[in-house]
Amino acid sequence: MSFIEIKGLRKEFGDVTPLGGVDFTAEKGDVVCLIGPSGTGKSTLIRCINRLETPTSGEIIIDGVNVCEKGVDIPSLRKKVGMVFQSFNLFGHKSIIDNIIMPQTDLLGKPEPEAREEALKQLRRVGLEIKANNMPDELSGGQKQRAAIARALAMHPEIMLFDEPTSALDPTMVSEVKNVIRKLADDGMTMLIVTHEMQLVKDIASKVLYMDEGVIYEQGTPAEIFEKPKREKTRSFVLKITRWSWDCTKCGYDFIGMTASMEEFCRSRFMSRKQLNSCLLVLDEIFTSYIVPAYEDDDFSFELEVSGDNDEIKLILRYTGDTDPFDRKIDPTSQAIIQKKTKAGLSDKPNEKVYEIVL
């Protein structure tokens, strides 16, 4: 028997069915990452596992015990299954160390000195011992989330559940939380993680569940899901998270909107500042030096493709029209920056030329 078994799990809220029959298994030490569009039941699934939501039907078997059965000891379950929320859920009127001491004394019955020692141990584990006596509002978002992780770890859970642990954080703070989660994976912690951080999924997941419309639409290893997805919705989802695109038609173009959209995509991929600036500078140069002077009611679009490890970034220009914007003679310095990096080709569409710039 697997350590975690989910069988036919359904959850209904009136006419809404966020979980329409979920089945999967996980072994001890597995890191299971749940991905997919918003509103597809991912958070509901892990809240059911911790019995924060009561399933309508189905089974959740953890270490041989069906936690959906009547009379199950929910407090004992929650000692075994730790939960980290996207909104931290720290008590604002208590210090960080007291936030970690309280569940140990209240739920585990530990003496206060022992609970304090454990709290300091877990704060050291997440790099926050120096903030033990601070109040939550004195910490950054990333530090609050690390404190929430330390609080869960102090209960010595066998399973950790994470519900979008980085979604409420500024991009500059995300890496510190991701690093803590990576360390837990290295330590062999069994984890179920709802996340939109695809690089984290690729780095640590032993199994990826792609959810859509309340069911597990496709599951597999990170390589299977991201490199060779078998089903159409999974392929479409993977494409959206690895490619940015912007269409400019003969009706006009919005350069400010385009650059803002590209910058948002680059930040969502957690590119370095150097990579982001490179993308924006090249887009600006292509647009102002080549496109605008040649623009004559032609259609064109930009795409930005990012490899899984962010080592290679391609900016692709698709231009449909009789003119060739790169035929123009402009400042030689500008040509050296762009044209030496540009590979041109023809597509199967009439009059469409494709230019690929590797950044």
Image (tube, rainbow, N blue to C red):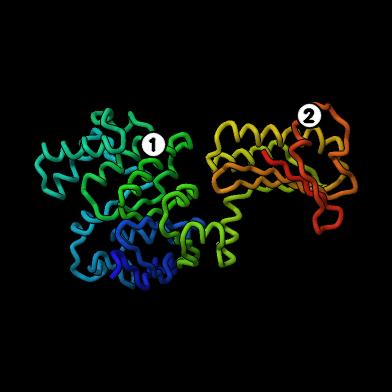
If the image is split into quadrants, where does the N terminus sit? bottom left
Q: Earlier in the sequence, mark 1 or mark 2?
A: 1
The 10 Å Cα crowd at callout 2, few under 14, some 14 to 19, many 20 or more, is: some
Whole-percent x, y for residue 329 in the image = 88, 32
Location of mark 2 (residue) = 334
The 10 Å Cα crowd at callout 1, few under 14, some 14 to 19, many 20 or more, is: many
Q: Nearer the viewer, residue 242 or 168?
A: 242
Whole-percent x, y for residue 62 in the image = 26, 64
At x 24%, y 39%, the residue is 122
Up/down of 44 relative to 169, above or below: below
Location of mark 1 (residue) = 142
If the image is split into quadrants, where does the C terminus sit? top right
Whole-percent x, y for residue 298 in the image = 85, 47
SS assignment at label 1: helix
Mark 1 and mark 2 in contact? Answer it, CB < 8 Å: no
Would residue 217 be visible to someone looking at this image?
yes
Whole-percent x, y for residue 91 in the image = 27, 39
Q: Nearer the viewer, residue 22 or 71?
A: 22
The kind of residue tagged 2 is Ser
At x 28%, y 36%, the residue is 92
The kind of residue tagged 1 is Gly
Question: What is the distance, in whole Å, between disc 1 and disc 2 at their CAs?
Answer: 41 Å
**Horizontal placement of 39 versus 276: left or right?**
left
At x 30%, y 42%, the residue is 148
SS assignment at label 2: helix
Would residue 249 be visible to someone looking at this image?
no
Front label number (1 vs 2) = 2
Give the farthest residue toward the right: 322
Where residue 130 sits, quadrant-wise, is top left
Up/down of 210 relative to 329, above or below: below
Where residue 45 sits, quadrant-wise, is bottom left
